Amino acid sequence: MKIQISDNILKHYLRSVYFINGQSCAGKSTMVKLLASRYDMIFCGENYHDAFPSNELSRWKQPGLCYFDTMSGWKEWLNNSPEVHWRWTQAVNDEATEIEIAELIKHAACGKKVIVDTNIPPYILKEISDYNRVAIMLCDPEITAKRFFNRDDPDKKFMMDQIKLCKDPETTLANFNAWLTYQDPNECDWEHTGFFTYRRTNSGVDTREEVLEMLAKHFGLIE
């Protein structure tokens, strides 16, 4: 029997957790870091499900999270089609959601507010949280493709290094960029989640303080 926890129980234990979800390059990581620092919140950054020991993952129960241990090499992953990559990311999101909820309950038990850069899908967030504890940040596709590698991020640098090692780096990079702009027919309708939404449209203007204040007001951290 698979153990299930009712949504009202999860909502109770996650009542001090604030979620930011959305698309790449929308500013989610930046805002989570700033909110945590400015308002003394517990910080949970991107991929915080990695806190779960990888050696305790199951290739049968968590095949998406175990993919990097089973693939033939980075060339295989980087050259997956946008459709295959999208299906893999959805599997990872589904598998990671269980871990993330468990981690967030642990952090929330400390008694402080928690701010999280999350991939928990909006339809689940509707069950375990409330409007004033969730924000969706979106980004125009052309900005995503242009800025993805122009960030001081070790993971992004590692991916670019692996792309350069491929037989045809230009084709592999073009395929990678196609992932960023691919929209599957079954993808979440980010524009109509029912949650508070902010869209990044101009990458050349520094709007961090403006967006920070907007999110802080939405979350009820300031009046």
Image: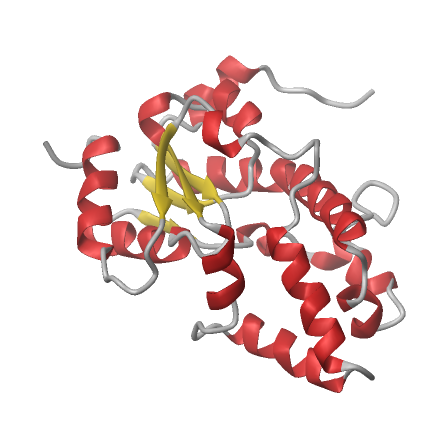
| Most distant residue in the front direction | 142
Colouring method of the image: secondary structure
Location of the N terminus (image quadrant):
top right
16 relative to 143, above or below: above
Question: Which residue is most to the left?
Answer: 223
Q: Is residue 51 visible?
A: yes
Q: Residue at x 43, y 44 (%)?
A: 138
Tell me if 82 is positioned left or right of 22 in this view: right
At a point 56% along the width and 24% down the height, the residue shown is 123
Question: In the figure, 72 relative to 27: above or below?
Answer: below
Question: Viewed as shown, does residue 220 lie left or right of 62?
Answer: left
Q: Residue at x 46, y 67 (%)?
A: 147
Residue 79 percent coordinates (x, y): 80, 66
In the image, residue 190 sits, relative to residue 146, either above or below, namely above
> In the displayed structure, does residue 121 sit left or right of residue 86?
left
Residue 82: x %, y % from top left: 74, 53
x and y, in percent, of residue 46 in the image: 50, 54
Q: Quadrant of residue 187?
A: top right
Q: Quick one: quadrant of the C terminus?
A: top left
Identify the residue at horizontal 27%, vertical 55% (top origin): 34
Q: Is residue 10 visible?
A: no
